[in-house]
Image: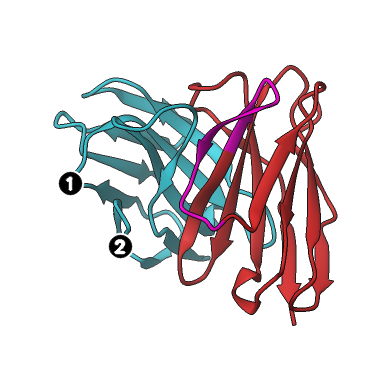
Amino acid sequence: KAGVTQTPRYLIKTRGQQVTLSCSPISGHRSVSWYQQTPGQGLQFLFEYFSETQRNKGNFPGRFSGRQFSNSRSEMNVSTLELGDSALYLCASSLTTGFYEQYFGPGTRLTVT
Amino acid sequence: GQQLNQSPQSMFIQEGEDVSMNCTSSSIFNTWLWYKQDPGEGPVLLIALYKAGELTSNGRLTAQFGITRKDSFLNISASIPSDVGIYFCAGQLRETSGSRLTFGEGTQLTVNP
């Protein structure tokens, strides 16, 4: 069974731009969660999507948003990029919401210059 | 702020030695999970714990869910060079919903052959 895939793997953007990251969960998994990983803050929860609805949201500004499609694939968008948004963005899938065994993708390394 | 304290931050051991790391919190967790992350990759799920007092093994790895529901430990026996990486504890706080995980700061493990 294929694992979680994320595209692109690497991205370089300029401050003020926006970016869209994509995540395809494991086949059959319907919940997708997004995390931001930085050296200073560690792994922090961004949001969770299940059945095309945001079920949970972390403490991030409104510039961070996401959505989920009917095939469970998810995208996250960051608008008006700031230097501090440079991070590894990880997507994790699980069978359903409230099921805590989450399987992570390889991440998208975003660098904001 | 950070709700999980993971220790030690780093460990340098000789191949064949046993390793122990732990996570503590002032809050109650419903679930504890342990992940390993290699450079440039997403975290890989090692062990999931669901009940207070539960002791679970996965090969050379053993983890326990503390009786108070506020701590967990991970032991690695007879370490080998491929055990090198960052180990994270993660859990779901009792007061949260969905699949939101809170992560520890990580333990960087180095194994000298």
Does the magenta portion include A16?
no
Which residue does the numbered mark 1 point to in the structure image? B26
Q: Chain of mark 2?
A: B
Mark 2 or 1: the one toward you: 1
Residue A5 in percent (x, y) is at 80, 41
First to last magenta residue range: A48-61
Chain letter belonging to callout 1 = B
Residue placed most toward the observer, B65 or A69? A69
| Outermost residue toward the left in this view | B68
Nearer to me, A67 or B11: A67
The numbered disc on residue A8 is: none
Residue A54 place in picture, x, y as percent: 60, 32
Instruction: Chain A: give its colour.
Output: red
Q: Write down the residue under mark 2.
A: B8
Of the numbered discs 2 and 1, the one sitting upstream in the chain is 2
- Give the amino acid at mark 1: Ser
Q: Is residue B53 left or right of residue B15?
A: left
Front-lying residue, A80 or B83: A80
**Residue found 81% across the figure and 73% down from its top:** A13
Q: Position of residue A61 (x, y in %)?
A: 54, 58
Q: Does residue B78 show up?
A: no
In the foreground, A63 or A7: A63
- Residue A28 seen in the current view: yes
- Name the residue at 74% across, 27% down: A26
A65 lies above or below B7:
above
Residue type for callout 2: Pro
- Residues flagged by tags 2 and 1 on a common chain: yes
Give the colour of chain B.
Answer: cyan
